[in-house]
């Protein structure tokens, strides 16, 4: 699988830490991409008429962490936006300890950053910063 380019504005949440996420220019870990605020990495439920639909956020099927829930399972983050900054939070609802991820420069590539020791495998939500 070749190197995958992020979409503008997306925050990529990666299952492994930076050292274990990419080898020889290829992702070897699973990831999930989100744009905007996510109240709870576990998922959400929405009514469509009288039908309740539940969505669960899981890592994709690529490599380590395939199909695991995103909540409390991430090791690193990649902010690919040129304008949007993000924070990842310890608790659902954008509460508790957080880590700031600035947007990349206009001509810079995306950079993978490890979650700090508090948020590593203890991440629950994200918000524009």
Image (tube, grey):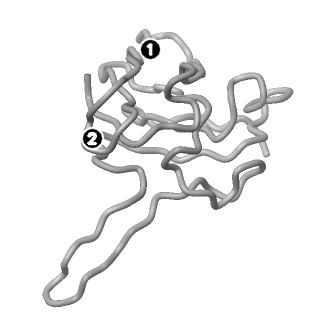
- Viewed as shown, does residue 26 lie left or right of 93? right
Residue denoted by label 2: 37
User: Where on the picture, by quarter, is residue 22?
Assistant: top right
Residue at screen point 42% across, 56% down? 42
Furthest-left residue in view? 49
Above-or-below relation of 3 to 116: below
Quarter of the image where the C terminus is located: top left
Residue denoted by label 1: 104
Furthest-bottom residue in view? 50
Q: Where's residue 1, x and y in %? A: 79, 46
Q: CA distance from mark 2 to mark 1?
A: 18 Å
Residue at screen point 26% across, 36% down? 94
Residue at screen point 41% across, 42% down? 124
Q: Where's residue 114, x and y in %? A: 60, 21
Q: Earlier in the sequence, mark 2 or mark 1?
A: 2
Q: Nearer the viewer, residue 52 or 26?
A: 52
Q: Where's residue 126, x and y in %? A: 34, 36
Q: Where's residue 65, x and y in %? A: 70, 51
SS at circle 1:
loop
């Amino acid at each position: 699988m070749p190197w995958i380019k992020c979409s503008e504005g997306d925050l990529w949440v990666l299952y492994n830490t930076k050292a274990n996420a990419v080898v020889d220019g290829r992702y070897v870990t699973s990831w999930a991409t989100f744009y905007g605020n996510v109240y709870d990495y576990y998922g959400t439920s929405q009514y469509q008429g009288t039908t309740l639909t539940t969505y669960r956020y899981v890592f994709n099927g690529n490599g380590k962490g395939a199909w695991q829930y995103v909540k409390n399972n991430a090791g690193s983050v990649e902010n690919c936006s040129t304008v949007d900054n993000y924070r990842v939070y310890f608790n659902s609802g954008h509460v508790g300890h957080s880590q700031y991820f600035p947007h990349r420069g206009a001509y810079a590539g995306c950079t993978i950053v490890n979650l700090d020791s508090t948020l590593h495998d203890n991440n629950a939500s994200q918000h524009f910063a």
